[in-house]
Amino acid sequence: MTPSRRPNPDRRIVPGSRVIFDTATLLSAALRSSSAASRAFSLALTTGVVCSREPALNQLASVLARRTLDRYMSRRARAGFVDLLRRHAWLCPPPPPSKSPGKPRSKSVGRAEPIKDLIAFAAAAEAGALVTTTPRPLARSSRRSLPILTPEEFIAIYAPA
């Protein structure tokens, strides 16, 4: 981990705080049990509160139901991952709609959640961290008080010594 990407010690995540995972990270956690995303997700389930929204869970379930993933993991196991998330995640209400004028966003299934939406969701959920595998350099520089971490960074902060 380079010094510029090291989490600020003043922003340490405390056990029991809320953690948000983007959909791509959850997909990685579901499909590769030995991945850093899977370890970070397990760690968040045991030490924190995983937050999600119904549309994100529906998107995850839709992607995990695809036949093309049958060669990686059984459908039953993939559905089990979504069920685990539904049982243990705190389902947050959607943030209030933005009042700023602009073009309406298309709601295409399979597209990554825009970082601004995730940050707004994290603020509404009063999350302690946002975990993502997607490189988002602009988001990292504008994260204000919300740590935006890779799964590896999350593990480094949370893992017991």
Image (spheres, helix red, strand yellow):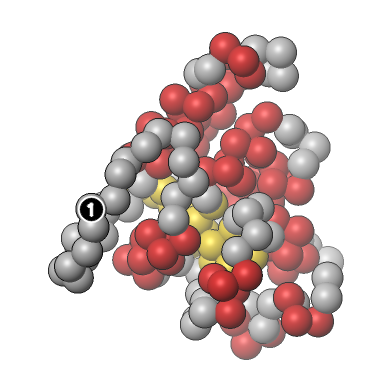
Residue beneath the point at 68% across and 84% down? 9
> What's under tag 1, amino acid-wise?
Pro
Tell me the quarter of the image containing the C terminus: bottom right
Residue beneath the point at 75% across and 77% down? 6
Label 1 element class: loop
Q: Is residue 83 visible?
A: no
Instruction: Specify few, some or many for label 1: CA neighbours under 10 Å numbering under 14, 14-19, or 20 or more.
Output: few
Tell me the quarter of the image containing the N terminus: bottom right
Is 116 left or right of 150, judged from the image as shown? left
**Relative image position of residue 142 (x, y in whole percent):** 52, 79
Q: Is residue 3 visible?
A: yes
**Relative image position of residue 13 (x, y in whole percent):** 60, 72
Is 54 left or right of 34, judged from the image as shown? left
Q: Residue furthest front?
A: 103
- Relative depth, front residue between 92 and 48: 92
Quarter of image, res 27: top right
Quarter of image, res 106: top left
Residue beneath the point at 50% across and 27% down? 63
**Relative image position of residue 42 (x, y in whole percent):** 66, 45
Residue beneath the point at 63% across and 32% down? 30
Depicted 6 relative to depicted 49: above or below: below
